Image (cartoon, rainbow, N blue to C red):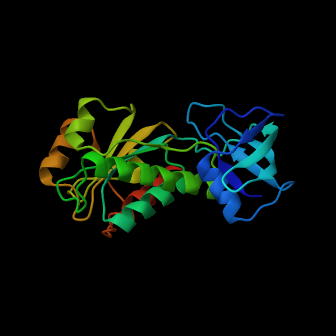
Amino acid sequence: MPRFHCPVPLTPGEEIALPPGAARHVQVLRMQPGEAITLFHGSINGPGGEFEATVTRMGRSEVLARIGTHHAVEREAARAVHLLAGITANERMDWLVEKATELGVASITPLLAERSVLKLKGERADKKLAHWQAVAVAACEQCGRNRVPTLHPAQTLADWLQAPPQDGQRLLLSLRPGTQPLHAAAPGHTGLVFLSGPEGGLSSTEEDLALAHGFAPVTLGPRVLRAETAPLAALAALLV
């Protein structure tokens, strides 16, 4: 059954106009009145779960649906992992956001690292953030998650450390000697922050700053993974 993100109040029995994004998707699928869909609010702190719904009207620019039964279904990971990911080249960052969402990441902060190829600020940064949030929404619609991970504004590591929005253990993916294997550094299911660099990795200055603020260096093994692959491998290991 098609699933759509619907960040508006959802009450069983009520008829609502679907938000523009969901309405467009229903129109693209050429759905007809009477067909069933699933709606979810998507907020991390919202009601959760998902709602049965039925398309009641297909207009040229408006789609109406009647809300049905609520199902308290949650498909979130047992552990909350917050990803600080060095911004990679355009398509690679999109892919990272999409797959991290599918794997169950709790939030993503795009990191303006010294070696990031893509430099963002002002209106361009706002547009990119909205684009990445839309990528995360689409991934939730596909994979069955009912809570969309938060995409924080792009920022430098120094800025993030001024007022970190997440608590918990801090891990840094590093190629330095003396790192611990990831599975040894993060046993159990406690929440954590995972920091990974862009193409070329974090600079030595950034790594030193992270280590000085409580990040423990970890490794994924003897092979050097691409910037968009490494955090996903870590998430897969942490969120199983």
**Residue in the picture at 37% in, 51% down:** 127
Is any part of residue 183 visible from this angle? Answer: no
- Residue 114 placed where, x, y %? 17, 54
Spot the residue most to the left.
205
- Residue 239 placed where, x, y %? 53, 50
Is any part of residue 124 visible from this angle? Answer: yes
For the residue pair 173 and 138, the one nearer the viewer reads as 138
Taking 62 as reference, is 27 above or below it? below
Q: In which quarter of the image is the N terminus?
A: bottom right
For the residue pair 210 and 54, the one nearer the viewer reads as 54
Q: In which quarter of the image is residue 151?
A: top left
Taking 167 as reference, is 222 above or below it? below
**Residue in the picture at 71% in, 46% down:** 39
- Residue 199 placed where, x, y %? 26, 64
**Residue in the picture at 23% in, 53% down:** 178
**Residue in the picture at 57% in, 56% down:** 138
120 on left or right of 83:
left
Q: In which quarter of the image is residue 219?
A: bottom left
For the residue pair 177 and 63, the one nearer the viewer reads as 63
Q: In which quarter of the image is residue 96?
A: bottom left
For the residue pair 138 and 110, the one nearer the viewer reads as 138
- Residue 208 placed where, x, y %? 15, 45
153 on left or right of 64:
left
Task: Count every numbered label the image shows and give the total.
Answer: 0
Taking 125 as reference, is 166 above or below it? above
Spot the residue most to the front.
60
